[in-house]
Amino acid sequence: MKRLLFFAALLAGNLLAEISAPQNLRIVTGEPSPTPSPGDPQDIDLTGYKLVFEENFDVLSVAETDAKRDNTWYSYPPYGPAGAFSSSHFVPEALQSIDGMLVNTASWNSERGDPLFRNWETGCLASMDKTRSGFAQRYGYWSARVKMPDAGWSAWPAFWLASVSGIPNGGSKGYEIDIFEWYGDFKTHVGHAVHPWNENGSQGDGAGGGFGPIPGGDATNSWHIYGCRVDPQWITFYVDGFESKRFPTNNEYLAEPLYIILDYALRGNPVSGDKFDTKEPSHMLVDWVRAYELPDDAPVPPPAAPTSLVINPGFDDDNADTQTPRGWEEWSDLGSNPNGFTRQGNSFSGAHYYVMEGDGAFRLFLSQVCSIPEPGLYTLRARVMSFGGLDDAAMIVKDYGGPDLDVTIPTSRAWTQITIPNIRCEIGTVRIGFWANSSGNNWIAIDDVEFFRQE
């Protein structure tokens, strides 16, 4: 739903009680929340499942920068401008960990001065950041124990999954799976949806959605467990351990793993005030979030390997010490530069890899021109190592009809995969390559270069 609303735009709970809150948390107190008991709703039978991600919110570990580093969460949807789907601003200040719960608060900030009068602020958590660092898995089971906000029509909290292929700028083929979307005017039911997105914003086979009842009909005063199992046959939604909805899996859209987003969004028109009646403040509470691998007896097919357009991607067409590998060109503004050659042993795969090194200063660009079979979005990725100390080292995309793109080759003596996704190629060729500028006694290594069309 979030990306659907964005494309449409392009075309035209319970109050907290007796809590010692930090001063910067805008909270009011009321009647005590129901106390969890042994009779509380249970999750599905998880016999044979393997717990691979667990967040109990004893502390809040969230990053505001594009790279979350050692933090568990990133504080904004990492897939670019389409992440601004809420009528509120997602701000990390709306998020707090209190008594082992995530408290996600919707409040009005009169000092924001938004020109569209969008002065509401709420919070969002994503398990991956804009660099594709974080937790994701392709198939599995995800669940969260949540109490919805006691708010008006505009309340729109959600717990959902999205394909890594959409990071950092969306517009790619992949899944959005809404484990729940809850609406403040439809309190007794919860929405479930699956969106297999194409690059142009249309949806593939298997798209669907619907509402399931919440046991007891109370989402704001009672805790409930919302879960989803994704396997090669079905995407199945659960509430309190009972199946709520089921849709067939379109594995064509599951080439990339799924990461978690948990947000308190608002809907409505803040300019006209239409239906914009959120109570202030109101709180979405989350006790925990968990993810599991499927049992060993669950069949999980491997993702289809993309068709690479690179000639001699692993440099295995050559002998060791070949200076100019087949299919590649070398350029240096220092004239004859023998600092790049194939090497044998210690490759990531195959027999050879390519290395740039030298005792003295060198500048070297290894590149090749790839033919584009059809216009669309493409990805460049490769395995690299680096001694460090280089003045400049990067993987580069040029001459494809858009601005030059690059990603820094990190310092690492272990093989690391780097990626430039969402390269919009409209002409027949593109130049891909690797640049190193060194003062000497340094090196970078390259193997398994792939350039392929995103499905």
Image (cartoon, rainbow, N blue to C red):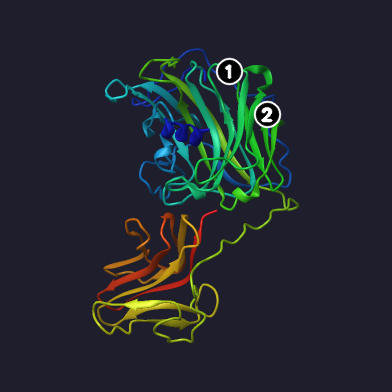
Check disc 2 and report the residue beneath it: 240
Identify the residue at image location x=29%, y=20%.
Answer: 110
Q: Quick check: can you spot residue 123?
A: no
Against 154, residue 312 (above or below) is below
Residue extending farthest right: 297
Residue 35: x, y in percent? 59, 21
The front one of 385 and 72 is 385
Badge 2 amino acid: Asp
Identify the residue at image location x=46%, y=35%.
Answer: 7
Check disc 1 and report the residue beneath it: 186
How many marks are shown on the rendered structure?
A: 2
Residue 404: x, y in percent? 32, 59
In the drawing, does residue 139 fall left or right of residue 344? right
Within-10-Å neighbours for mark 1: few <14, some 14–19, many 20+: few
In the drawing, does residue 338 fall left or right of residue 304? left
Residue 338: x, y in percent? 32, 85
State the CA–CA distance, disc 2 to disc 1.
18 Å
